[in-house]
Image (cartoon, grey):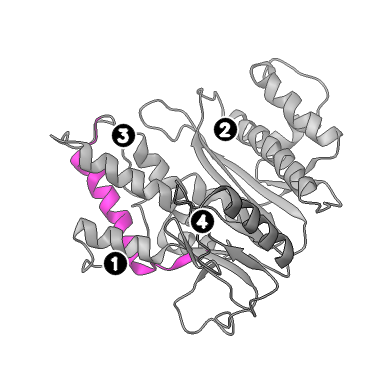
Amino acid sequence: MDDLLLIGNDLCEIQNTEKLLHGKFSIKDLGFLNFFLGIEIVKPAHGITLYQRKYVLDLLSETGILGCKPCSTPMDYNNKLYSSSGSTLPDATSYRKLIGKLLYLTNTRPDLCYDVGHLSQFISTPTDQHKQATYRILRYLKTNPSLGVLFNSSNNTSLKGYPDSDWGACLDTKKSVIGWCFFLGTSLVSWKSKKQNTVSESSVEAKYRALAMASCEAQWLISLLDDLKFSNSSHVPLFCDNISASYIAANPFFHECTKHIEIDCHIVRERMQNKTTHFLPISSSQQLDDIFTKPLPPASFHSLISKLDMLNFHIPSCRGLLKYAPQGKNKAHTPSSKN
């Protein structure tokens, strides 16, 4: 890779860095940033939007389903997939390539995070049903190929997180799926969907492991904001929809039911005691992280999408968001090395 970005709010410093690089390498200034590694960058009036419309359209054209009928959700919530569902494909190469391309798309499409992650666990021996599920994702992409994440410039620096888990979701191993998402102000800045490494004996244990991983992610985000000279005045709230997990976190004593998750208990409690995080109750119906842990029916899925602060940039009714911000104060260069 010979492309790089220079991003900052000091134009003189950017130009000095560019001259320094030009003295060592033969580089070319491509001007203001609008496209980089398949990601399109647009600056509406309220911040910066990242999306991959061209990447999606090229993927649909390459797979031959550009003219297909769109689909409302990326995965059928009534169809549970497992490793031996369907007939094994004679050649798994095309499936693996498609999953790899969809994984790159999750950089700007958190709505695909769970679905692509779930299908990626079948790349060793994919079946025809697994391939049909990937094509359903492509049909969903045709519905809104320009959907992306919006980073609002008027945001504050307060963090909040939504950890969650789906107990025993994997039909093959009975391992739980955990996920989390973090917002900086109103902008989604971090999201994750992952199958747990071990089997959880209860839904409380699965939830608590999600809290432990989300607590570590909150600590990392706070450190990152400190490095960027942004102050986070209060400890990060984690919205938990499991009362039992909150009680365990507040209980200073371990008993027979919690010994198997004692390490996770220590991690969560340590973050609470040093005021890195604190728990707030939330109902399961309002848990935003459900989209990262399980397939959902269309109504629930689109309700959560609307709360992730994502923007479909090519819809004309965006009420002023399509007005470009004046360029000149914040300049992003894309020098390209030719050595």
On the image, the x and y values in percent for residue 330 come to: 67, 69
Look at the image and tell me whether residue 287 can be seen: no
Q: Alpha-carbon neighbours of circle 2 within 10 Å: few (<14), some, or many (≥20)?
A: some
Looking at the image, tell me whether mark 2 or mark 4 is earlier in sequence order: 4
From the image, tell me which residue sits under label 4: 27
Mark earlier in primary sequence (4, 3): 4
Q: Which residue is drawn at the image coordinates 67% and 39% (left, top)?
A: 217
For marks 1 and 2, give the CA distance: 35 Å
CA gap, disc 4 and disc 3: 42 Å
Among numbered discs 1 and 4, the one appearing first in the sequence: 4
Closer to the camera, 194 or 285? Answer: 194
The numbered mark at residue 38 is none
Residue 122: numbered disc: 3
Residue at the spot x=40%, y=25% of the render? Answer: 173
Question: How far apart, in angstroms, are the residues tagged by discs 1 and 3?
Answer: 24 Å
Label of residue 203 in the image = 2
Q: Position of residue 203 (x, y in %)?
A: 57, 32
Q: Which residue lies at the image location 36% right of the left edge and 34% below the top edge?
A: 121
Which residue is nearer to you in this view: 98 or 289?
98
Identify the magenta region. 125-148
